[in-house]
């Protein structure tokens, strides 16, 4: 009797397992069968909402499309959202129709066939309407897999009060050499020009900076990946510069971005400037309220005098999930959010737009609107959006993210932080980092060349 | 699981427990009470574990899909330095933190049970209260306290002109140990305390009539009683500290630099492999290996004495 | 259920039963008397300040040592309470254990309950639902299972313990993916069930009830009831359950805390913020400060944390009485 039971239990367990295993691989159905009715659907939308404006935008969309309802689930952070999406795709069940992703993770889902190629719906024709930086990041095999909702051109934010004390004019910092000279003067007053700790939260600013330096630390070509972390010319330029800042104690290497200490140091002037995405004003306003009126924003310093090279830091996008049964309606929604009326509403409530039409519009830089006025007051009366808009329209080099970007981000923290704690040089750290990226690439079945 | 009660009428006449519990034939009555727990347990634990074992023999790649690889994940794990360094770290943590915490818990339980304290109730509740705080919140609070610049440690440094940094890599593990000790001393204290209070009062009386001193009562009566609950607290504490995850991962962003790597503990390593590394098969192999290691240690340390207790 | 039919075969059934009944009654009475004696003694001892007959003095030294420990245990609560009175601006700029420039506790509380259309209240209700059903169910299953393990020698009994210890040794993090897949397959993710079903298992509760049943329910009593013809369930509910009450309170305490503070599983299982428990909700608010373009609302996170803890603290204080009565009952064991 006992044996019978054991056999029965084992059989049941195996049966369940097989069914679980089977469902894991059932995601490659014919996508055109899942287009659904473009005018009638109940959409589920995963994303994070920083400005609490999502509700209004969805209401606007539902009004314009009476047959479609959208249920927004706030999934917390970018990282949690992409984790949840990969879980749902693995389960073949419970995935949303529309998902918000950080730009660099889009390729990963495109490679693994989790997202719909939006050129099926004509999204490829929208290329010229968006700023080049965010648009370029969302292409895989030359096809758009997501549409940008915002963008994050890298900017130079500085605390004028601290700069004045050190006798530095922030406006005159045009090159990274100027930046270095300023860093020395600011350090003499006890503050740091900025913080660099090499944690995973510093990964995006890192990619933005090497991007701007014209570096190509990795190259993806189909199933082939080339990793060149230290021998690349642009990388060398970057490494030498940052190593100098570390060696001469010109940057705060102890405080990671987004930590509470970071906010406090921004708030008390210990950190005098940041090179970070254009979405930063709202974070500064709430994170460093005591410095109201002191912060300013300027264009990113350049490697060569007279250049106008920009780079992207952060930014997010909307994509249609392949498991969705309502793909046509889902596309309608993301088109509305990123390219249609929703984009304007988002821009009005503080999202930094990627749509050229909005970036160039008068109302975007109009200092009399309520939102702009609030921001400009914090920045001592500067017309912030004017500066940001100029940056967004600067040319950017093409930059590719690795198809396993989330891994690249966490491994960055593990390896590169050692350079900032002084254990090894930045060059060594980046070399180790390159090795790890190569290993991961091989684990994932890529053919990797490590230089 | 029907009741197969094989007690014959003749035997029933004996009316003793021994007669009721038939030694030769299976007595399924217990399952009447056991099955609800068992069903949920199988659903929530056993099936996922079997599945984890199953997938640990496969490998899923972005290019090439899923394929059977036999023991490859395990052999890779065997030479994975990051994994062994994380195991070493939690082992060290266990060896130091668990005894300290259990000593504090036992001492507190004995103190409360001695009735020699003013305000026993207050102390009992205050020791137990930290257990009510979610790990997210307690780690956040301690993180603020630890801050060498803005935390209480920072204020201490400013005041005394010292330069203490409890979050520097060399003492970080101790700082995490402190959070765990704070969270779980009360929990263990309560277990010890309940077991002390099962000692019949008459025993103390008899002992004191025999002229036993207080210390002798502690040594001869109370400590032996604690030994039983010690087994279970040790096992649960070992399992708990081998699975260290919440505290270091929440603290990660509060610690200067990147002292807490993504492979700081085996659990964090498994999490990162699974959720950011797209290597859930390898993570499953890691989890199974950790389970084996944990069980082996728990068994070596205490399981034997516990089994005796369970008869 | 089966014992009724068994006894009916005897000729002297009526006499036997009467005899049994009397014996059982006597035994019950005796147990009761012992319990009452113990209880009275404990009470007396405690009132007069001496637990043990031979230690008539309370120790100031020991009290001081314990007081130091109590400060260690309590000061994070003080920190939380103080910081809940601060505005976001004060929080980033003022000393941790000192008050801010403005006393914003009430503002913070109101904001916590109105922020994002009052979603915090929803999370609060969810958590209570999960605790009632999840922890309540976990306690019930633990009682029944523990009772079975202590009072029956059923096939597989010895395995149960090994299997449980083995199963909880597997890092929960790694089980999250298979658990998620299983629940997703059954369409249970994003529903309260995803939170409740896993909460139903409390291995520690099972262990506690095992030990407790072993000690608190005398075999003789069960035998007597069976001889009386009571079915297993009737015996369980009428005789065992009341004896187990103090152990149940302790087990409930542990399962309530475990469910209330559960973090990792709902994080994976729930993506609909309408079903979040408090821990996930709070963490989502905390994350907002580190989202590009997000607003830092640490004041709400801190105040929300305080509000999250308060019900548990109250529950502890209320249940305190019962732990104490649990002690007396435990003392029946000889």
Image: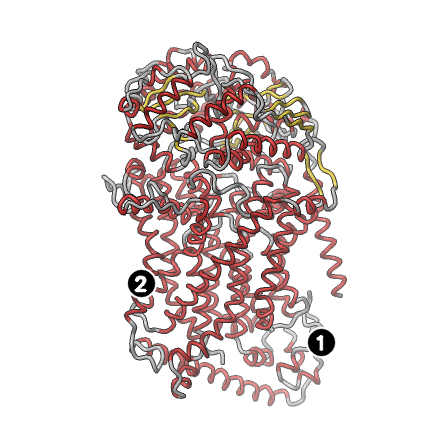
- Quadrant of the image occupied by residue B305: bottom right
Element under disc 1: loop
Q: Are marks 1 and 2 in contact (CB under 8 Å)?
A: no
In the rendered structure, find residue B218 and report the number of the disc placed on it. none
Element under disc 2: helix
- Left or right position of A190 against C223: left
Report crowding for label 1: few under 14, some 14 to 19, many 20 or more residues within 10 A (C-alpha). some
Taking the spot 59% from the left edge, 30% from the top edge, the residue there is A434
**Considering only vertical position in the picture, is C187 above or below A296?**
below
Q: Which residue is mark 2?
A: C67
**Considering only vertical position in the picture, is C146 above or below A151?**
below
Most foreground residue, A435 or A157: A435
Taking the spot 41% from the left edge, 11% from the top edge, the residue there is A361
- Residue A34 drawn at (x, y percent): 65, 27
- Quadrant of the image occupied by residue C20: bottom right
Mark toward the viewer: 1 or 2: 2
Can residue A337 be seen? Answer: no
Q: Which quarter of the rendering shows the N terminus of chain B?
A: bottom right
Most foreground residue, B4 or A234: A234
Taking the spot 53% from the left edge, 65% from the top edge, the residue there is B232
Q: Which residue is mark 1?
A: B6
């Amino acid at each position: 009797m006992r044996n019978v039971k054991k056999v029965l239990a084992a059989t049941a367990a195996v049966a369940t397992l097989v069914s679980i295993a089977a469902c894991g691989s059932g995601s490659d159905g014919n996508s055109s069968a899942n287009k659904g009715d473009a005018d009638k659907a109940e959409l589920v939308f995963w994303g994070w909402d920083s400005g609490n404006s999502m509700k209004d935008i969805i209401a606007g969309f539902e009004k314009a499309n009476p047959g479609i309802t959208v249920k927004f689930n706030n999934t917390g952070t970018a990282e949690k959202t992409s984790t949840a999406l990969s879980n749902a795709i693995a389960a073949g069940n419970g995935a949303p129709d529309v998902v918000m992703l950080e730009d660099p993770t889009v390729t990963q889902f495109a490679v693994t066939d989790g997202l719909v190629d939006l050129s099926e719906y004509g999204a490829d024709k929208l290329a010229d309407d968006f700023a080049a930086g965010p648009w370029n990041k969302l292409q895989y095999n030359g096809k758009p897999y997501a549409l940008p909702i915002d963008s994050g051109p890298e900017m130079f934010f500085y605390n004028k009060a601290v700069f004045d004390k050190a006798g530095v004019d922030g406006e005159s910092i045009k090159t990274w050499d100027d930046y270095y000279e300023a860093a020395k003067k600011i350090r003499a007053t006890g503050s740091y020009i900025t913080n660099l700790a090499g944690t995973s939260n510093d990964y995006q600013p890192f990619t933005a900076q090497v991007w701007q330096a014209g570096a190509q630390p990795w190259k993806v070509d189909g199933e082939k990946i080339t990793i060149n972390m230290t021998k690349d010319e642009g990388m060398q330029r970057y490494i030498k510069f940052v190593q100098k800042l570390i060696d001469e104690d010109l940057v705060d290497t102890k405080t990671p971005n987004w930590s509470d200490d970071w906010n406090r140091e921004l708030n008390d002037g210990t950190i005098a400037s940041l090179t970070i995405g254009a979405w930063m004003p709202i974070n500064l306003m709430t994170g460093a309220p005591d410095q109201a009126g002191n912060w300013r924003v300027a264009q990113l310093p350049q490697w060569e005098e007279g250049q106008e090279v920009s780079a992207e830091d952060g930014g997010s996008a909307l994509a249609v999930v392949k498991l969705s049964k309502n793909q046509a309606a889902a596309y309608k929604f993301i088109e509305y959010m990123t390219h249609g009326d929703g984009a304007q509403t988002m821009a009005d409530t503080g999202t930094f737009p990627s749509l050229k039409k909005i970036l160039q519009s008068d109302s975007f830089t109009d200092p009399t609107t309520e939102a702009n006025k609030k921001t400009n007051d914090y920045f001592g009366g500067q017309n912030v959006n004017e500066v940001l808009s100029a940056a967004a329209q600067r040319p950017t080099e093409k930059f590719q993210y690795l198809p396993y970007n989330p891994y690249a981000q966490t491994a960055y923290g593990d390896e590169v932080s050692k350079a900032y704690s002084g254990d090894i040089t930045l060059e060594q750290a980046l070399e180790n980092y390159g090795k790890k990226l190569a290993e991961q690439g091989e684990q994932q079945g890529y053919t990797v060349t490590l230089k | 699981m029907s009741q197969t009660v094989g007690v014959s009428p003749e035997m029933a006449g004996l009316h003793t427990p021994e007669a009721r519990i038939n030694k030769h034939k299976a007595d399924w009555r217990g399952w009447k009470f056991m099955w609800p727990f068992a069903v949920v347990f199988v659903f929530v634990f056993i099936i996922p574990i079997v599945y984890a074992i199953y997938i640990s023999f496969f490998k899923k790649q972005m290019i090439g899909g899923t394929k059977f690889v036999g023991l490859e994940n395990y052999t890779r794990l065997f030479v994975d330095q990051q994994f062994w360094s994380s195991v070493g770290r939690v082992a060290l943590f266990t060896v130091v933190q668990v005894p300290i915490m259990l000593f504090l818990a036992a001492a507190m339980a004995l103190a409360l049970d001695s009735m020699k304290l003013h305000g026993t109730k207050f102390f009992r509740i205050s020791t137990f209260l930290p257990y009510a705080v979610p790990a997210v919140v307690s780690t956040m609070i301690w993180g603020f306290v630890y801050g060498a610049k803005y935390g209480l440690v920072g204020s201490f440094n400013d005041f005394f002109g010292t330069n203490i940094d409890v979050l520097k890599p060399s003492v970080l593990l101790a700082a995490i140990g402190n959070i765990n000790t704070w969270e779980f001393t009360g929990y263990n204290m309560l277990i010890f305390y309940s077991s002390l209070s099962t000692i019949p009062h008459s025993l103390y009386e008899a002992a004191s009539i025999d002229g036993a001193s207080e210390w002798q009562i502690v040594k001869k009566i109370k400590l032996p009683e604690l030994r039983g609950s010690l087994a279970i607290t040790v096992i649960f504490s070992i399992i708990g500290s081998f699975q260290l995850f919440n505290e270091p991962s929440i603290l990660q962003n509060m610690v200067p630099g990147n002292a807490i790597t993504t492979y700081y503990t085996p659990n964090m390593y498994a999490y990162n492999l699974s959720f950011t590394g797209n290597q859930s098969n390898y993570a499953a192999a890691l989890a199974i290996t950790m389970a084996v290691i944990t069980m082996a240690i728990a068994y070596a340390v205490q399981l034997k004495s516990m089994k005796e207790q369970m008869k | 259920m089966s014992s009724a039919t068994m006894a009916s075969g005897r000729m002297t059934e009526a006499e036997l039963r009467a005899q049994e009944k009397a014996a059982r009654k006597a035994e019950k009475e005796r147990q009761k008397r012992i319990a009452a004696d113990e209880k009275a003694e404990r009470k007396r001892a405690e009132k007069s300040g001496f637990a043990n007959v031979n230690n008539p003095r309370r120790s100031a030294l020991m009290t001081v040592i314990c007081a130091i420990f109590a400060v260690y245990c309590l000061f994070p609560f003080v920190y939380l309470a103080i910081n809940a009175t601060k505005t976001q601006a004060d929080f980033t700029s003022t000393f941790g254990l000192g008050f801010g420039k403005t006393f914003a506790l009430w503002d913070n509380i109101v904001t916590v309950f109105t922020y994002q259309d009052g979603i915090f209240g929803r999370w609060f209700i969810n958590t209570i639902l999960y605790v009632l059903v999840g922890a309540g169910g976990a306690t019930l299953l633990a009682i029944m299972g523990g009772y079975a393990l202590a009072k029956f020698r059923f096939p597989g009994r010895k395995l149960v313990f090994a299997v449980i210890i083995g199963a909880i040794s597997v890092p929960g993090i790694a089980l999250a993916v298979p658990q998620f897949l299983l629940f997703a397959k059954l369409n249970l993710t994003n529903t309260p069930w995803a939170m409740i079903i896993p909460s139903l298992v409390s291995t520690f509760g099972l262990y506690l009830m095992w030990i407790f049943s072993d000690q608190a329910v005398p075999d003789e009593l069960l035998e007597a009831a069976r001889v009386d013809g009571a079915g297993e369930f009737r015996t369980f509910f009428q005789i065992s359950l009341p004896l187990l009450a103090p152990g149940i309170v302790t087990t409930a305490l542990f399962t309530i805390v475990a469910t209330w503070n559960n973090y990792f599983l709902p994080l994976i299982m729930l993506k609909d913020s309408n079903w979040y428990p408090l821990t996930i909700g709070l963490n989502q608010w905390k994350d907002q400060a580190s989202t590009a373009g997000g607003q830092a609302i640490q004041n709400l996170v801190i105040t929300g944390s305080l509000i999250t803890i308060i019900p548990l603290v109250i529950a502890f204080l209320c249940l305190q009485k019962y732990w104490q009565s649990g002690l007396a009952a435990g003392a029946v064991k000889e």
